[in-house]
Structures are given as C-alpha cells and as structure tokens.
Amino acid sequence: MSGIQLAAIFYERFPAIRVLMLSMHDNVEYVTQVVRPGASGYVLKDSQATGIIHAIDAVLAGKTFFQRGTCGAHDSGTIDADAARTPDAAQARHS
C-alpha cells in the first residue's frame, strides 16, 4: 500500500487527522495526489532536520507546509489548510 492510499484511508476514517507526508518524490503530480484528499503538508526525505521540525510545527498549528521545490513553490512556507484543498493548491502558498 502506498503512502497516498494509506493517507486516503486515514482521512476517510479520521477526518480530523493531520498528515504530513515525508517523501522522496519531488514532482507536482505526486504532491497534488496527496493534497487533494487532505494532506496537511509535504516534505522531502532528504530535508534537513530543522526543516522537518518546522513542517511538523506548522501542521500542528493548523497550517499546511510545502517544502521549497515541491508544488512549484519557490520558498518553503505555510498556507491555510482549506486553501490547500482547492484545485489551485499547487500554486497557493504563504510564507
């Protein structure tokens, strides 16, 4: 089972759950597949520990975190969780 499939099951069974995806895939299509069902964030596995901690803190605070380079983001940053679930989520961000 893939992380995307597992996340979809989590969202279905536990709608209030917040999931931060840690992945090796750095492409918009993969990120979009994770965000649409409700992912709260996306970080690459080769990130520095401080970046992962920042992502965790953002997700716990109710924000969505996308690492630099993912979703076409030029900067790492947070966005409102609801905005991440819109069709234009790949471009929405707020640092």
Image: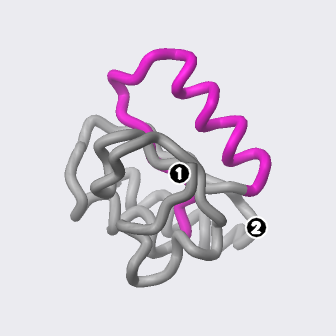
In the image, residue 42 lies in the stretch drawn in magenta? yes
Q: Residue at x 75, y 56 (%)?
A: 62
Q: Position of residue 58 (x, y in %)?
A: 68, 43
In the image, residue 66 lies in the stretch drawn in magenta? no
* Tag 1 residue: 41
Q: In terms of secondary structure, where does tag 2 sit? A: loop
Q: 10 Å neighbourhood of mark 1: few (<14), some, or many (≥20)?
A: many
Judge by depth and name the residue closer to the eye, 2 or 69.
69
Residue flagged by tag 2: what amino acid is it?
Answer: Ala
Q: Position of residue 67 (x, y in %)?
A: 42, 41
Decide if residue 25 is on the left or right side of residue 60: left
Give how far apart the Cα atoms at labels 2 and 1 are: 14 Å
Residue flagged by tag 1: what amino acid is it?
Answer: Gly
Q: Position of residue 44 (x, y in %)?
A: 36, 34
Decide if residue 57 is on the left or right side of residue 1: right
Which residues make up the magenta segment? 38-62
Q: Residue at x 32, y 48 (%)?
A: 70
Q: Residue at x 68, y 48 (%)?
A: 59
Q: In terms of secondary structure, where does tag 1 sit? A: strand
Judge by depth and name the residue closer to the eye, 53 or 10.
53
The quadrant in which the N terminus is found is bottom left
Decide if residue 76 is on the left or right side of residue 83: left
Q: How many marks?
A: 2
Q: Quadrant of residue 94?
A: bottom right
Above or below, comparing residue 11 to residue 57 in the picture: below
* Tag 2 residue: 16
